[in-house]
Amino acid sequence: MVAPPARAADLPLGPKSLDERRSVSRVAPGVRWTRIAREGGPWRVNVLTLAPAARVVAAPAGDAAGERARPSVLSRRLAAVAAVNGGYFDGDGFPVGALAAEGRLLSEPVGGRSALLLGAAPRSIGPLRFAGAVRVDDEELVLDGINRIPGEIPACGGRGGDRPTERASAVTTCTDPSELVLMTPEWGAPTPRGRGFLDAVVRDGLVTALRAGGGSAVPPDAAVLTATGSARAPLRGAGAGAAVELDQSILMRSAVVPQGDIVSGGPRLIAGGRVRVRSSAEGFAPLSAPWFHGSFVASRQPRTMAGVRRDGSLLLVTVDGRRPGWSA
């Protein structure tokens, strides 16, 4: 028999009979820090409650894609009162899933995976999909990604014929022989090199140069479109001087997401105050790796969570782990 989902307020952190200590402090206007120590595990939980007017930003680890830094380093750099980690990254440090900072999209969504929208009013959480497009002269092309190696789609969830699936899968890097990827100055390095790559430097809405084989520098005031496979022909045919329009739209369900800071996560745990875990839909219970859900989602791990209340206040929660005697 399947029990009805528990209300969020009733979710137990271990048996209710266990001893629990809480302390609450105000760390800044509109920012409250609750520390919870609960016996049994034991568990150590930190909760930041941020008023709707409190300023919250998403920040990449460094000036170039692939850099890594501890939240404490970013907190000092931004002179923040608090910081938590967020999102996922691949083995090379590149973001996996939607990441936008200062209104600039640095990485496209993993299709259908949840993300926290910080720039919208009110803040919200929901599944995102990428709807990017490039218009070259009069031809509209699918924009597959932002700041990643063309043909490699970490965690899948892409578009336009990715193999073996266009559904999200946390354990798979999908492939696509024909892609168009936008490289922005935040990429921080020459574009990927490849025998079948074609770069188009785009500045002020015009193609200013074409380069076969990739390896182009990304100017600070421009971007580079890197094409592979059949996506190369429209760029090569249009040539230098062609007019280009870039559309980096992101959709939540069918609505376009306003520009602003975004950080992805997953899986979604609660919606409308009820437990609604989206492990399968967001690629955290892939059929190709039935062990993954149990080892990553359902087992004890250190966690970071974000939640938005009905009044628009934001919860940022961390649960310590892997420290016997301190927090399980």
Image (tube, rainbow, N blue to C red):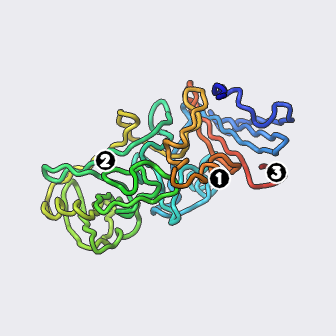
Dot 3: few (<14), some (14–19), or many (≥20) neighbours within 10 Å? some
- In the picture, measured across the screen, residue 8 lies left or right of residue 36, that is left
* Between 66 and 284, the one nearer to me in the picture: 284
Q: Which residue is mark 2?
A: 132
* Between 40 and 134, the one nearer to me in the picture: 40
Q: Which residue is mark 1?
A: 295
Of labels 1 and 3, earlier in sequence is 1
Q: What amino acid is labelled 3 in the image?
A: Trp
Any mark on residue 268, and which? none
Badge nearest the viewer, 1 or 3: 1
Any mark on residue 326, and which? 3
Q: Secondary structure at mark 3?
A: loop
* 57 versus 218 height, above or below: above
Q: Secondary structure at mark 2?
A: loop
Q: State how far apart marks 3 and 2 are (Cα).
A: 46 Å
* Between 200 and 154, the one nearer to me in the picture: 154
Cβ–Cβ below 8 Å for labels 3 and 2?
no
Expressed as whole percent of the image width and height from the top left, the position of residue 226 reads 29, 63
Dot 2: few (<14), some (14–19), or many (≥20) neighbours within 10 Å? many
Examine the rendering and report whether any part of residue 105 can be seen. no
Q: What amino acid is labelled 2 in the image?
A: Gly
